[in-house]
C-alpha cells in the first residue's frame, strides 16, 4: 500500500512567520499536487510538480519536488491569516486512470 | 455555473432512508470521482468514472451506489447507511491526459447519519 506522510500534522503560527510543510513517500511519484482546503469546502488545487528537483512559486508559496520524486515541500513566507487551512499533498504513482493518493494533510492556523 | 457543483451541501438522514448526492462539472472533463473525507483520515477514493464507465470501485459497501449518466453528471445513491458513514463526500473531475492528473473538487456534501 502506497502511503503519503505529511508533517507536521498541525501548525499554529503568528502572522509574518515563515513555515515549511513536508510530504514524503517511499515510492516514486510521476506527479504530485498540493491542495488547500478551507472548512466546509472542497480542496482547491495550488500547484502540480512533475520533474525531479522542480521548484514552483505562487506568490508567497514555494513548492519543491525532490530530486528522486519521492518527496515534496511547501514553504510559505510571511504567512497571513488568509493562509489558514488544511494543506494536502496528493501523488500519482503512474497507476491506472491517474488516480491520486492523498496524505492526511497539515492543518495550518495563522493568528493575526 | 462554473467548476464543480454538488447538491445538497448538507444532508441529515436516518439509517433507513434513501437519498442521492448529485455532482455536476462544467469543465469539459471526461473523468469524475467520488471521495469520502472523515476526520483524522486521508481522503478515500470511492469510485472513478472515465467516459461514463466505472473504472474503479475501491471496495466500497453496496449501500453506496454510483451512477454516471453522462460525463458531466455523477450521482451517489445512498441507502441503509450506518452512523460511521457520516463524513464529507467530495466529487472531483479531471481531464485524463498523460502526465497530468489534476483534479478539481466540488464543495462537498456534509452527510450526517443518525
Image: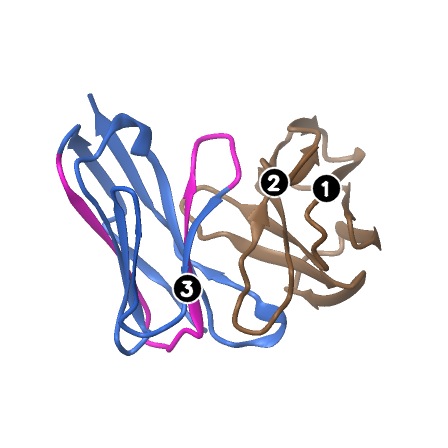
Same chain under badges 2 and 1? The reply is yes
Which chain corresponds to the colour brown?
Answer: B
Q: Judge whether A100 appears above or below A104 on screen.
A: below
Q: Which chain is blue?
A: A
Q: Secondary structure at mark 2?
A: loop
Circle number at residue A25: none
Q: Tell me, what colour scheme is on the image? A: by chain
Q: Is residue B10 left or right of residue A103?
A: right
Residue at image x 44%, y 69%? A31
Q: Residue B17, located in which quarter of the rendered image? A: top right
- Count numbered badges in the picture: 3
- Identify the residue shown where x is 56% and y is 54%: B103
Check whether the beta carbons of the residues at disc 2 and disc 1 lie within 8 A of each other.
yes
Q: Earlier in the sequence, mark 2 or mark 1?
A: 1
Q: Position of residue B10 (x, y in %)?
A: 64, 27
Give the chain letter at badge 1.
B
Residue denoted by label 3: A32
Residue placed at 67% from the left, 26% from the top? B12
The location of residue A86, given as percent across then percent down, is 37, 41
Q: Is residue A37 magenta?
A: yes
Q: Residues in magenta?
A: A17-42
Where is residue B57, by image quadrant? bottom right
Which residue carries the number 2 mark? B106
Chain letter behind tag 3: A
Circle on res. B23:
1
Q: Secondary structure at mark 3?
A: strand
Amino acid at each position: 500500500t502506497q502511503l503519503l506522510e505529511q508533517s507536521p500534522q498541525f501548525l499554529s503560527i503568528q502572522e509574518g512567520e515563515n513555515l515549511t510543510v513536508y510530504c514524503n513517500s517511499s515510492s516514486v511519484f510521476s506527479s504530485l499536487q498540493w491542495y488547500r482546503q478551507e472548512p466546509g469546502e472542497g480542496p482547491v488545487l495550488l500547484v502540480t510538480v512533475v520533474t525531479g528537483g522542480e521548484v514552483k512559486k505562487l506568490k508567497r508559496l514555494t513548492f519543491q519536488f525532490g530530486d528522486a520524486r519521492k518527496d515534496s515541500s511547501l514553504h510559505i513566507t510571511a504567512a497571513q491569516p488568509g493562509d489558514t487551512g488544511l494543506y494536502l499533498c496528493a501523488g500519482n504513482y503512474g497507476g491506472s486512470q491517474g488516480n491520486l493518493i492523498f496524505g492526511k494533510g497539515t492543518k495550518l492556523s495563522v493568528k493575526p | 455555473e462554473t467548476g464543480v457543483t454538488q447538491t445538497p451541501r448538507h444532508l441529515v438522514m436516518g439509517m433507513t432512508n434513501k437519498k442521492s448526492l448529485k455532482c455536476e462539472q462544467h469543465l469539459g472533463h471526461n473523468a469524475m470521482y467520488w471521495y469520502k473525507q472523515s476526520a483524522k483520515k486521508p481522503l478515500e477514493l470511492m469510485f472513478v468514472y472515465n467516459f461514463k464507465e466505472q473504472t474503479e470501485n475501491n471496495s466500497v459497501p453496496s449501500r453506496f451506489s454510483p451512477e454516471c449518466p453522462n460525463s458531466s453528471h455523477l450521482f451517489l445513491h445512498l441507502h441503509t447507511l450506518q452512523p460511521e458513514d457520516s463524513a464529507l463526500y467530495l466529487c472531483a473531475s479531471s481531464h485524463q491526459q498523460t502526465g497530468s492528473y489534476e483534479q478539481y473538487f466540488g464543495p462537498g456534501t456534509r452527510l450526517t447519519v443518525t
